[in-house]
Amino acid sequence: MELLLKAFILGGVICALGQILMDFTPFNVTPGHILVGYVTVGAVISALGWYQPLIDWGGAGASVPLSGFGHLLAQGAIEGVKKNGLLGAIGGGIEASAVGIAAAVIFGLLTATFFKPRG
Amino acid sequence: MATNKAGKQTLIFPYAPVIFSWGTVVGPMEGQGPLSGYFDKIMENDLEDGDKSWEKSEQGMMQHSMEFALEKVGLTGENLDFYLAGDLLNQIISANFTARFFDVPFLGIYGACSTLAEGMTLGAALLCAGYADKVGVSVSSHHETAERQLRMPTEQGVQRPLTAQWTVTGAGTYLLSAAGGGIRITSATVGKIKDLGVGDANDMGTAMAPAAMDTLKTHLQDMNRKPEDYDLIITGDLGVLGLNILKELMRQEGYSVDNVSDCGVLIYKPEQDTHSGGSGCGCSGVVLSYILQKMLEGRYKRVILLGTGALLSPTSSFQGESIPGIAHGVVFEYS
């Protein structure tokens, strides 16, 4: 129960930050900027070793938001380099996030097959 | 020599054409608005039963509005000399596809949300010049097709800022005649593009307000009139924000603003949460039918509709271009 609460708080704070960036900054920040920005910033923070502590504390609250995807990419790339040398930097990130990417493709295909998207 | 032109931009119609019939179709959300009693048909769903796409439903709306307008006076498309129509979609497909169903010479027009005012100006000019006895003008817009055309995919769930307006799902057809009695189109002012550099497609009221002001000012100068000479000055789709800007601009010019309103403000209730009000060709396209009805009831004698248009395209938006605004004024009189 405590873990649930922590995840809720951390995830909420991360998302609220994005909302504040969109609503209260003079720049024209769009959801697209947030999407790309969060993945990138997540990867950078992760490379510096600061993201794992967030996941240890807040669990899914840190791994589910887009910055968690950036964390996965960065850690995968680091692992890849350790295992396969520099080429691993390119493949490692995708390897680590393969489940998420494959799931997106499969569920996308299923949705398109069984529903009639109109929007 | 342009004998029927007043001042710089205003067309005077010596044989003022009559609006002798009209038809309107709206979507469910407009049907819950304050003007619901004035529309000929309220759709139960944005997507009509059996339609494969929203685009098909929009085309159907325009067709039905035309059929309503014709049926009311017992005519068919063949009785019209010209048909002018436009909408917001690429290559104005709603208008083109609607014209397939009516055996009538067709001119497609595009003026974004100012299309109705543009069509009425051109239609009145055709009638006055003796090229036609009866002309039909149709416009349409559809919230879902406009979102697809001009903004983000609906399922992306992008939040709408408070400046954003809600594209009206609605279509209106107005039939003009050279002869007969009724509400007349007495003059029209063709607007110039005004672009003050607003680039936010979610803030079109701000982009269009200067164009509305410019056309109104030119019209009043050309006709040597004051705002008080009109019972109602109604803009097409400035929305809550744009209307406030227009009123501010008018105050700076020393005009009174008591009789100024906007179709986009009238069509929805505040609690319908559209943010800045309605927009789209269908906005003035269906609200005009309400105003004409009020004119017949004697509430207004002389009304000017300032059809406002934001002439952007998705490509120009992505490339960071600003939004060119335009406004055309059409004067209706009934006595």
Image: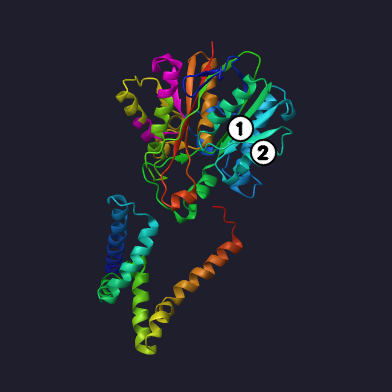
Q: Quick one: quadrant of the N terminus of chain B? A: top right
Query: Where residue B145 sits in the image (x, y, percent)?
Result: 55, 46
Q: Chain of mark 2?
A: B
Name which quarter of the figure residue A61 lies in: bottom left
Q: Tell me how far mark 1 sits from mark 2, CA to CA.
A: 9 Å
Q: Chain of mark 1?
A: B
Q: Residue at x 29, y 55 (%)?
A: A21
Query: Where residue B177 sits in the image (x, y, percent)?
Result: 65, 20
Residue A55 in view: no
Which element type, helix, strand or loop, lies under badge 2? Answer: helix
Q: Nearer the viewer, residue B312 or A93?
A: B312
Residue B243 is one of the magenta-drawn residues: yes
Query: Where residue B64 sits in the image (x, y, percent)?
Result: 65, 34
Q: Magenta stretch?
A: B217-245
Q: Would you place residue A16 above or below residue A42 in this image? A: above
Residue B98 is tagged as 2
Query: Where residue B103 sits in the image (x, y, percent)?
Result: 74, 33
Image position of A22 (left or right of B149): left
Q: Amino acid at mark 1?
A: Ser
Contact between marks 1 and 2 (CB within 8 A): the answer is yes
Q: Nearer the viewer, residue A47 or B115?
A: B115
Q: Would you place residue B9 above or below residue A68 in this image? A: above
Q: Would you place residue A22 above or below residue B171 in this image? A: below
Which element type, helix, strand or loop, lies under badge 1? Answer: strand
Q: Nearer the viewer, residue A114 or B122?
A: B122
Q: Residue at x 36, y 66 (%)?
A: A66
Characterize the local packing of mark 2: few (<14), some (14-19) or many (20 or more) Cα atoms within 10 angstroms: many
Can you identify the residue that label 1 sits on? B138
Going by the picture, which residue comes out furthest to the top?
B335
Name which quarter of the figure residue B198 lies in: top left
Characterize the local packing of mark 1: few (<14), some (14-19) or many (20 or more) Cα atoms within 10 angstroms: many
